[in-house]
């Protein structure tokens, strides 16, 4: 609408001619770390969840310190506990209703430190005297690099409630930590090959089932690994890991 008239403001009057436009409202981004109503209960729940994330980070750093001092198996045990706390913080966030973008970023950064850095350091320390040092370094650098790519891709990709795209960093760290903890009787070069396969599996586009779907398998299927663990725990571990890695390409072929 075109208008001509006067504008009155703070004791002065001036002529105004032009077009009228609706006022533009600029919304400032919220600085709250936790969206929603900030009740005392939600604040405490939010603090508890992030305390679990920071505990996971601390356990990962402790694993690095222990590996540097030669306590490799103890470092691997700390990594296993670290994996447990990483799963706990996500479960608590969903259960208590305090999931947030801040929490997701915190979890991702902690995962990079604990699983993208601590796990390769522990593996490197375990391989230091069994394979050439440069080969161990390259394999562990691959794990760290692929973990960074995997986490960044996960942060910007749409989420699938049933499958991961590539093996998650948490699963990779758990496999590496358990392999060190149970001291697999496998030649060093074979272990290097397994580390490289896990690294590439993280950045692959193959669909891998989430733990929530795996635990819903028929109970009788769980008897097989239980019996296998009683007979030969190490062999059962290797078979289960191999089956999980192969499941991704098989699911991909099925969807094709």
Image (cartoon, rainbow, N blue to C red):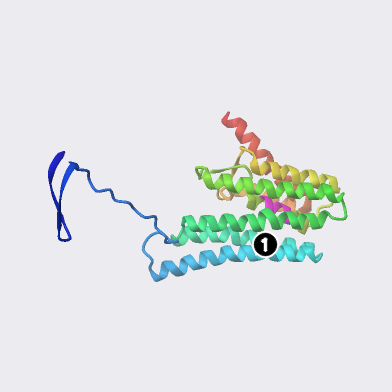
Q: Give the range drawn in magenta.
A: 172-178
Classify 10 Å Cα crowding around label 1: few (below 14), some (14-19), many (20 and above): many
x and y percent of residue 127 in the render?
Answer: 83, 54
Q: Which residue is drawn at 55% across and 50% down?
A: 212
x and y percent of residue 40 in the render?
Answer: 40, 71
Identify whether 10 is placed above or below 238: below
Identify whether 47 is placed above or below 183: below
Please name whichever residue, 160 or 158, is drawn nearer the observer in this view of the structure. Answer: 158
- Direction from residue 192 to residue 250 in the image, left or right: left
Q: Can residue 186 be seen in this view?
A: no
View extreme (top): residue? 256
Identify whether 5 is placed above or below 105: above
Residue 32 highlighted magenta (yes or no): no
Q: Element at badge 1? A: helix
- Identify the residue under disc 1: 60
The quarter of the picture where residue 233 lies is bottom right
x and y percent of residue 102 in the render?
Answer: 49, 58
């Amino acid at each position: 609408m075109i208008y001509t008239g006067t504008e009155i403001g703070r004791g002065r009057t001036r002529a105004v001619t032009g077009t009228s436009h609706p006022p533009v409202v600029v919304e400032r981004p919220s600085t709250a770390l936790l969206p929603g109503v900030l009740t005392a209960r939600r604040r405490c729940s939010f603090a508890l969840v992030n305390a679990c994330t920071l505990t996971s980070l601390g356990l990962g750093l402790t694993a690095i310190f222990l590996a540097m001092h030669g306590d490799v198996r103890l470092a691997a045990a700390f990594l296993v506990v670290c994996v447990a706390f990483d799963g706990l913080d996500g479960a608590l966030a969903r259960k208590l209703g305090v999931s947030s973008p801040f929490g997701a970023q915190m979890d991702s950064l902690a995962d990079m430190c604990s699983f993208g850095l601590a796990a390769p350091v522990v593996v490197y320390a375990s391989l230091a005297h069994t394979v050439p040092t440069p080969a161990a370094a390259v394999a562990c650098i691959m794990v760290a690099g692929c973990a960074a790519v995997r986490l960044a891709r996960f942060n910007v990709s749409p989420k699938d409630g049933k499958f991961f795209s590539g093996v998650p960093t948490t699963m990779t760290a758990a496999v590496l930590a358990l392999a060190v903890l149970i001291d697999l009787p496998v030649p060093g070069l074979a272990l290097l090959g397994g580390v490289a396969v896990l690294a590439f599996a993280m950045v692959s586009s193959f669909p891998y089932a989430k733990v929530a779907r795996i635990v819903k398998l028929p109970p009788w299927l769980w008897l097989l690994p239980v019996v296998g663990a009683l007979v030969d725990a190490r062999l059962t571990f290797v078979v289960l890991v191999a089956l999980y890695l192969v499941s991704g390409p098989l699911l991909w072929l099925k969807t094709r």
